[in-house]
Each structure stands twice: as C-alpha cells, then as structure tokens.
Image (tube, rainbow, N blue to C red):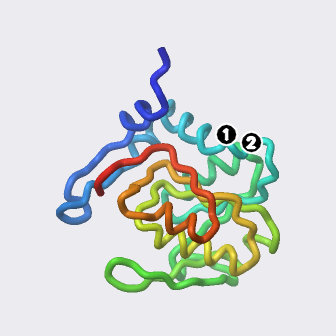
C-alpha cells in the first residue's frame, strides 16, 4: 500500500529542536529535497490543482522557494521569478519593506519579472507568521500581478500566516501542518 502524502512528508522532513534559538522547532526540508520520491510527491501535489490552468509565472521566495518554485514552474510550463533580499538582483528592481521579529527587512524583484495582469503563484517552503509571504504579495501586486494562490509545503497554523494571506484575498495551499513551532 502506498504511504499517504502526510506520512511521506512527515518521514522526509527533519525537525531540529532549539534552532535557530531555544524553544523553536525548525522544520528542515533539505531532507525532503534529498529524497527523490518525497520531493517528487510534494511537487506533484503543489502542481495538481493548477494543472491545465493558465499560469504565467511562479514567484519563489529566497531561498527554498527557488528550489520548489523552479520545479513547480517547470511542471506548469510557467516562467520563474525570484523574490530576493535587498541588493541581490542586478537589474532594476521594485522593493518592499516588511517587519521581522526583531526589526525590518526588504525584499525585491526585477521590475520586469512580471507584467501587469500576469497570473502568478507564490511558492515557498513554509508559512509561519506570514510576514514574508504577505510582503511578497504586496510586491507582486505593486507591479500588477494577478496572484492565483500562495503554495507551501509546510504550514505552522498556530502562527497565523495562512489567515494573514487569506485576509489579503490570496488562496493558500499547504501540504502538511505542524502544531507548535
């Protein structure tokens, strides 16, 4: 019998206690990425609801969103657009500032990465508080993207990120949830 998606992902995601600080349970997807079967299954599940739809671009958030987003873009025959930390892109950019636990940060993308009206799916590995993803939504909307959804492998539901994105009118797709953080 084929293991459930949840079992496959739970078995493939490593949990590291007290990283990056005491009390945090870090959900490490590098073990999922190195497991060909689990990686393929995760990508197939992220892609499935959008197969056959017109998707112009996948926007991936640095850094694990690049890996997952690139694979999703390939499967959907869509372009890929990186959303990066400030100062990492070589061409003209648009930028947004957002709050972190201990201050502010900025992310940016190339000004010509998405054209107004293009249909975009935002991809990252994990949704926690939703601050980074909400900033990415703001950035994409700033240049006129039509955001179809935000997709994540992992949801930390007690931190409220999903609700934050849904309040912005962005449908959220996650594959597995972990209580606690």
Q: Are marks 1 and 2 in contact (CB under 8 Å)?
A: yes
Label 1 sits on residue: 48
Instruction: Tell me where residue 139 sits by quadrant.
Output: bottom right
Q: Position of residue 136 (x, y in %)?
A: 58, 72
Q: Position of residue 46 (x, y in %)?
A: 60, 44
Q: Is residue 51 above or below residue 3?
A: below
What secondary structure is found at the residue carrying circle 2? Answer: loop
Q: Nearer the viewer, residue 33 or 131?
A: 131
Q: Is residue 4 above or below residue 109?
A: above
Q: Position of residue 153 (x, y in %)?
A: 49, 48
In the picture as drawn, the residue positioned furthest to the top comes out as 1
Q: Gap between marks 1 and 2, in whole Å?
A: 5 Å
In the image, taking residue 15 as reference, residue 127 lies left or right, namely right
Q: Could you tell me which residue is drawn at 36 percent across and 59 percent down?
A: 158
What secondary structure is found at the residue carrying circle 1? Answer: helix
Q: Which mark is residue 51?
A: 2
Q: Quadrant of the C terminus?
A: bottom left
């Amino acid at each position: 019998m084929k293991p459930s998606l949840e079992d496959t992902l739970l078995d493939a995601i490593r949990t590291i206690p007290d990283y990056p600080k005491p009390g945090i349970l870090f959900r490490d997807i590098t073990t999922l990425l190195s497991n060909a079967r689990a990686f393929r299954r995760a990508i197939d599940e992220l892609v499935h609801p959008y197969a056959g739809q017109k998707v112009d671009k996948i926007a991936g958030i640095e850094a694990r969103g690049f890996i997952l987003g690139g694979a999703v873009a390939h499967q959907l025959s869509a372009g890929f657009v990186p959303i990066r930390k400030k100062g990492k892109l070589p061409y003209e950019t648009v930028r947004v500032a957002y709050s972190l636990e201990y201050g502010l940060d900025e992310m940016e993308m190339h000004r010509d990465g998405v054209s107004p009206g293009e249909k975009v799916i935002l991809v990252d590995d994990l949704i926690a508080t939703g601050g980074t993803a909400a900033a990415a939504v703001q950035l994409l909307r700033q240049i006129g993207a039509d955001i179809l959804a935000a997709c994540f492998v992992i949801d930390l539901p007690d931190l409220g990120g999903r609700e934050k994105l849904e309040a912005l009118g962005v449908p959220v797709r996650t594959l597995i949830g972990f209580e606690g953080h």
